[in-house]
Image: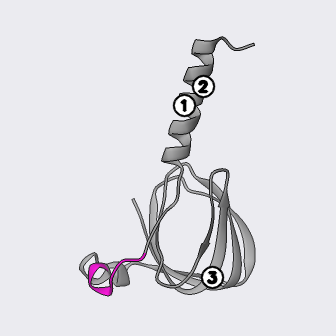
Amino acid sequence: MLEQEEYKIVSFLFLQKITEMRIEIEQPEQEELEEAGVFSWPVWEHEEDKLEWYYDKTEQCYIVEGSATIISEFDSLTIKPGDFLTLPAGLECVWDIQNKIKKHYSVE
């Protein structure tokens, strides 16, 4: 049985992991995307599928076409054109692609 102090430490570490592993999603303006050079980033496309994925480095991506649900231990997000995502290093997730995805991406 965990002592109260041990329980607090375990709870803190779990909450810290949740915060670190959250997928950030934004809808930036076209001008912001152009200034950041997003449209010169490489393009990744994938047909309807269900993919298990692990991010060993942080990735930022901008969804150009399609839709998918990204499911992790901490999130379940449906993404669509216009969404800008930050997927943190260490994230394990499943991409459930409903409509062919096209995205610009950058890995840090």
Q: Which mark is residue 13?
A: 1
Image quarter (top left, top right, bottom left or bottom right) of the N terminus: top right
Task: Give the image location of residue 17, x and y in percent.
Answer: 54, 40
Residue found at the very far left of the displayed protein = 35
Q: What residue type is labelled 2?
A: Val
- Front in this rendered view, residue 25 or 101: 25
- The image position of residue 34, as x and y in percent, is 28, 83
The residue that disc 2 covers is: 10
* Residue at 56 percent of width and 81 percent of height: 80
* Residue 28 or residue 65, whichever sits in front: 28
**Residue type, label 3:** Ser
Q: Earlier in the sequence, mark 1 or mark 3?
A: 1
* Distance from the alpha carbon under mark 1 to that under mark 2: 5 Å
Q: Is residue 72 magenta?
A: no
Tell me if mark 3 has few (under 14), some (14-19) or many (20+) residues whose alpha carbon lies within 10 angstroms of its own.
many
C-alpha gap between disc 1 and disc 3: 33 Å
Q: How far apart are the alpha carbons under marks 2 and 3?
A: 36 Å
In the rendering, which numbered label is found on residue 67?
Answer: 3
Among numbered discs 2 and 3, the one appearing first in the sequence: 2
Start and end of the magenta stretch? Answer: 27-32
The amino acid pointed to by label 1 is Leu
Horizontal relation, residue 13 to residue 38: left or right: right
Kind of element beneath mark 3: strand
Q: Which of marks 2 and 3 is in front?
A: 2
Mark 2 touching mark 3, by CB under 8 A? no
Please indicate whether residue 61 sits to the left or right of residue 99 in the image: left
Disc 1, disc 2: CB below 8 Å?
Answer: yes
